[in-house]
Image (cartoon, grey):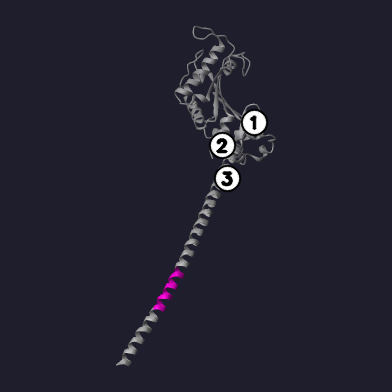
Amino acid sequence: MKKLSLVVVSALLLTACVSKKKYVALEQDRDQLKGELHKTAIAKDELEKKFSEIEARVVAYNNKINALKDETTSLKNESDAKFTTVGNEAVISNASKVKMRETLAKVDQSKLAGAKTLKDSMNLAVAYSLEKSFAKSNLDETEDIAIDIDETVVMISISDKLLFNTASYRVGNKANNILTKIAQLMKDEPSLDLMVEGHTDSRTIHNEKVSDNWDLSVLRATSVVRKLQNEFKVPPSQLIAAGRSSFQPLVENNSKENRAKNRRTRIVIMPNINKFFALMASNE
């Protein structure tokens, strides 16, 4: 009985010793894990700090890149907008020069070979565009209509009998067909200006409505301009009225037939160079 008791007690003591060792070992494992966890937390904080610094640098670099892009765009726009003065009137931007070169690529190379200056090149580009527009207008010469294209200018001479009665400045309807075509050309090409010149023969005129040939030629020009504006809706900013009286005759005023030739209205269609190249640059 005593032997049994000793065995039981020994077993209990052995069990207690083993459990305590395990406990101590577990405590040590726990402390080690705590230490590792603490190190991991410190490492995590350091990584987050480094990540924040990297993120801040990335944002700074992106801002610099965007700033450089904006600066590059600004410099390009500034460069494109820079103007070159040509002669005493026209100015042309770098962007317009690019468009002009595209147009010149379509011009007859034999003509292009003769262009020695920027102004020569401009005139060729303008003339090409004007001829192209004029070709679509369906304007044709007749007995009472003479058309002459001189490089960058189109001159259309309309006989007096097609527009006015003798000594009158009121526009009739006989010329509506040609005025319709001219008006359409002007509305299609906002870079063009149109000048109407009134011409008379040398015979003097004076009545209660008309003082002299100067008066008659100006009144006829303004009548045509008003008809183009009011009936055919040509923008008035494209229109000019001028009176030439009898001082630019085509032939001597020594016969009825010659005087009839000198009584005419000349329509001069010409490009407004600044408008032309501004529109050319804007059509990108």
Circle 3: residue type? Leu
Is 139 left or right of 10, judged from the image as shown?
right
Looking at the rendered structure, which numbered label has been put on residue 64? none
Does residue 26 show up? yes
Q: Residues within 10 Å of mark 3 (few under 14, many from 20)?
A: few
Regarding mark 2 in the picture, which secondary structure is present there? helix
Q: Position of residue 104 (x, y in %)?
A: 62, 39
The numbered disc on residue 68 is 3
Q: Nearer the viewer, mark 3 or mark 2?
A: 3
Q: What is the C-alpha distance between the residues marked 2 and 1? A: 16 Å
Q: Residue at x 54, y 36 (%)?
A: 282
Image depth: mark 1 or mark 3 in front? 3
Range covered by the magenta-colored residues: 20-33
What residue is disc 2 on?
A: 281
**If the image is split into quadrants, where does the C terminus sit?**
top right
Q: Position of residue 115 (x, y in %)?
A: 68, 35
**Of residues 180 and 22, the one drawn nearer to the viewer in this rendering:** 22
Above or below, comparing residue 17 to residue 30 in the picture: below
Residue 85 numbered mark, or none: 1
* Number of other residues with Cα within 10 Å of mark 2, as a class: few under 14, some 14 to 19, many 20 or more: many
